Image (cartoon, grey):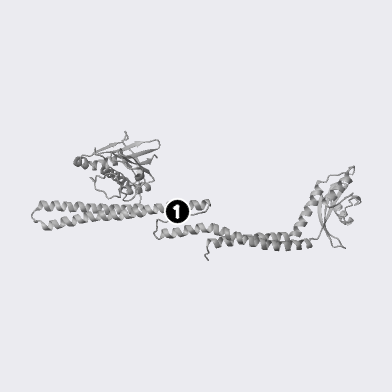
Amino acid sequence: MKNKLSTKIFIYLAVFSIFILLFLFFFQVIFINSFYEWIKTKTIKRLSSSILVTETDSALYEKLDKLSYQENVCIELSNNDGDNLYSTLNNSCHLRTKEIKQKFILSNKKTKTYNLINAFTKEKSIMSATKLNDNLYIFISTSLIPLNSTVNIIEQQLIIVSIVVLLFSIIVAYFISRRLSNPITQISKAADLIAKGKLKTNFKTNSDIKELVELTNSLNDMKIELSKTEELQKDLMANVSHDLKTPLTMIKAYAELILDININDKKKCRDNLNIIIDEVDRLNNLVNDILTLTKVENNLDNVNKCDFDLIKLIKKIVTQHNIYVIKDGYNIEFIHDGIDHLIINADSKKIEQVIYNLLNNALNYTGKDKKVIVKVCELDNCYKIMVIDSGAGISEEECKHIFDRYYRSKKNHKRYVYGTGLGLSIVKNILLLHDYKYGVISKINKGTTFYFTINKK
């Protein structure tokens, strides 16, 4: 059965209070006689072991009288024959059990405790017998005063105290449960509003409990991230719709042109068909990137690691991009600081996609000098791969989101190389699959460097 938090706390505190009262009742009423007897037994045993006397001790009797009075016990000294050498005059001494003494002396035991009952008064007593030396024995006894009247008083007192304490506990439990549950109830209501899409709702608490304050702060941070995610989702839908609509519109337009022009005009037909093919390629790239990102984000794409030469792979990718050097005047430079070969264990196709996407991104955003540098350098415990452009740079705030899907940077986009807006997000997820550290360093008007690191074996 599910109950409110306040009800649960109230029940737990009330049950705990009842348990404490029951414990006190059993200890003070039910077991008080046993406890009293245990204390008395412990006392006379302690006295027996602490008294060291001899027959020639001149101050012996005075010492024993004083001890008997202070502890309210009866002390007797006997010899081997059971004859009393000394007996205190304490009024509590009612036992004259010569038979028990003689039995203990004959047993040759070091110490023993006896529970005794007076045949006439039925009064219970405890006697501790101890052998001091070969001809000297000490017997210490104490009466167990009946506690019936005391127990009755304590029992009545406990009933009154229990009622008062129980009422007080219920009141305290109620206020404590309210104080603990109210902030959580407020947080729960705010969470329900967030779940219904009201992302402007703030989590608030007036509690001074550290954990609740931290929970509130964490939920507010979560709300901010959800708001960003919602914005990114809207941007994603808008951008994907735009990127799908543009080539489809162009395909339709140029297809209509082909219908309108003379079929014998082969040059115009070929030009229009080439444009249609380019736009279809753009659509294909967009769909492929969306599928790739979905696989990587959901760990559906397996990582097939093997040993390969990273330097050789980067040279191949740079060579493939020479078309932009020839056609558009770009300057792509590969610097590897004398590292002729770098054998790594990774998924070569995915790492190739990472380098390819970073290089395309740099070509899109580089400066007027159209210069892009791919650099590999060796550090103390890793290799660092960098792709550097000379573009307008990215602000510190934008750097935090640059790897998000379809995040639109405010810097000037050249668009010499067609992209889908998903490249950097694919890069991030592939590097995460390989457990490679990655990042971006940028300064306004001084270019941007995207990098990742590969630990040495």
* Image-based side of 90 in relation to 234, left or right: right
Query: In this view, which residue lies farthest toward the front?
Result: 206
**Quick check: 306 above or below 40?**
above
Rendering quarter of residue 334: top left
Q: In which quarter of the image is the C terminus?
A: top left
* Image-based side of 370 in relation to 56, left or right: left
* Image-based side of 451 in relation to 192, left or right: left
**Quick check: 79 above or below 377?**
below
- How many numbered tags mark residues here? 1
Seen at 37% across and 52% down, the residue is 228
* Image-based side of 235 in relation to 251, left or right: right
On the image, the x and y values in percent for residue 233 come to 33, 55
On the image, the x and y values in percent for residue 436 come to 38, 44
Front-most of 141 and 364? 364
Seen at 22% across and 39% down, the residue is 330
On the image, the x and y values in percent for residue 170 come to 61, 62
On the image, the x and y values in percent for residue 324 come to 21, 42
Rendering quarter of residue 190: bottom left
Front-most of 318 and 388? 388
Q: Can residue 30 be seen in this view?
A: no
**Quick check: 318 above or below 75?**
above
Query: In this view, which residue lies farthest toward the bottom?
Result: 1
Front-most of 270 and 320? 270
Q: Can residue 321 be seen in this view?
A: yes
Seen at 68% across and 62% down, the residue is 162
In this figure, which residue is indicated by the disc labeled 1? 219
| Amino acid on which disc 1 is placed | Leu
Identify the secondary structure beneath mark 1: helix
The crowd level at tag 1 (other Cα within 10 Å; few <14, some 14-19, many 20+) is: some
